[in-house]
Image (spheres, helix red, strand yellow):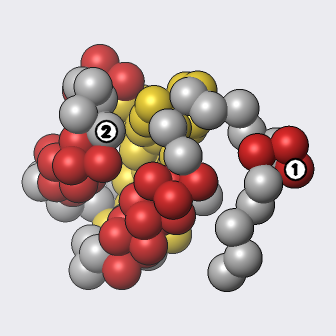
C-alpha cells in the first residue's frame, strides 16, 4: 500500500476515530477488544466503549473511539482486529 501524503488524507491526525467491531456474543469479547485497542492507543479506556447486542443476542457490536495518531497506527489496528479469532467484522 502506498503511503498517503498528509495533504491527501481524509483524516487529520491526531483525532478521535470510531471503530465498530462485531463478533459472536461472548462474556470476554468486550474486555478482549479493549486490551487489543489499548495496545495501539495507550490513552484508550473502557469509558470510550459502546456495546450493542444483536436483536437475538447472538452477536455483539462494540464501538471503540481511539486516538488516531497516524495512518500506520490505524492500518495496524484494523489488521490486528480483523485477524482476531473472536472478530467477524471491523468497520
Left or right of 89 in this view: 10: right
The quadrant of the image that shows the N terminus is: bottom right
Q: Which residue is mark 2?
A: 41
Q: Secondary structure at mark 2?
A: loop
Left or right of 68 in this view: 83: left
User: Where is residue 2, by image quadrant?
Assistant: bottom right
Q: Pointer 1: residues within 10 angstroms few (<14), some, or many (20+)?
A: few
Against 87, residue 59 (above or below) is above
Q: Is residue 65 visible?
A: no
Query: Where does the image place residue 82, in percent across and percent down from the top left?
Result: 43, 74
Label whose residue precedes the other's in the sequence (1 or 2): 1
Q: Pointer 2: residues within 10 angstroms few (<14), some, or many (20+)?
A: some
Q: Which residue is mark 1?
A: 8
Query: Where does the image place residue 44, in percent across and percent down from the top left?
Result: 29, 29
Distance CA(mark 1)–CA(mark 2): 24 Å
Please tell me which residue is depicted at 31% across the width and 38% down the height of the picture: 41
Please tell me which residue is depicted at 23% across the width and 34% down the height of the picture: 42
Q: Secondary structure at mark 1?
A: helix
Amino acid at each position: 500500500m502506498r503511503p498517503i501524503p498528509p495533504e491527501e488524507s481524509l483524516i487529520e491526525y491526531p483525532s478521535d476515530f470510531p471503530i465498530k467491531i462485531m463478533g459472536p456474543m461472548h462474556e470476554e469479547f468486550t474486555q478482549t477488544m479493549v486490551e487489543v485497542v489499548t495496545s495501539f492507543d495507550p490513552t484508550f479506556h473502557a469509558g470510550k466503549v459502546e456495546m450493542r447486542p444483536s436483536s437475538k443476542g447472538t452477536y455483539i457490536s462494540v464501538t471503540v473511539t481511539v486516538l488516531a495518531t497516524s495512518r500506520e497506527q490505524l492500518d495496524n489496528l484494523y489488521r490486528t482486529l480483523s485477524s482476531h479469532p473472536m472478530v467477524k467484522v471491523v468497520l
